[in-house]
Amino acid sequence: MTPVVSSSALPDYYGEERRARRRVRVRQTLAWAGLFAGLTLALRRIGGR
């Protein structure tokens, strides 16, 4: 039987790439949320007149 090696013992080759992708995803999500909020406020302002 081969010994089970924990993933933390292996070098994290793709960790940095995963973290970078997560940062981009968070930034895109925040951008979309901001755009949606801005559009909602603008439409509400136009409709209120």
Image: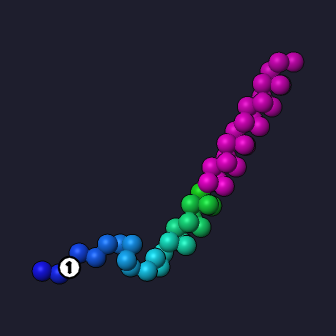
Whole-percent x and y of residue 16? 55, 73
Q: Nearer the viewer, residue 7 or 45?
A: 7
Whole-percent x and y of residue 14? 48, 75
Q: Main secondary structure of the magenta part?
A: helix
Q: Residue furthest left?
A: 1
Against 20, is 47 above or below? above
Whole-percent x and y of residue 39? 75, 36
Q: Nearer the viewer, residue 47 or 5?
A: 5
Against 11, is 33 above or below? above
Instruction: Name the residue: 83% across, 25% down.
Output: 45
Q: Nearer the viewer, residue 6 or 45?
A: 6
Number of callouts? 1
Q: Would residue 20 be found to the left or right of residue 14 on screen?
A: right
Instruction: Name the residue: 80% across, 21% down.
Output: 47
The image quadrant that residue 8 belongs to is bottom left
- At label 1, the amino acid type is Pro
Q: Residue furthest top?
A: 49
- Secondary structure found at label 1: loop
Against 48, is 8 above or below? below
Residue tagged 1: 3
Residue 35 drawn in magenta: yes
Q: Which residues are magenta?
A: 26-49
The image quadrant that residue 17 belongs to is bottom right
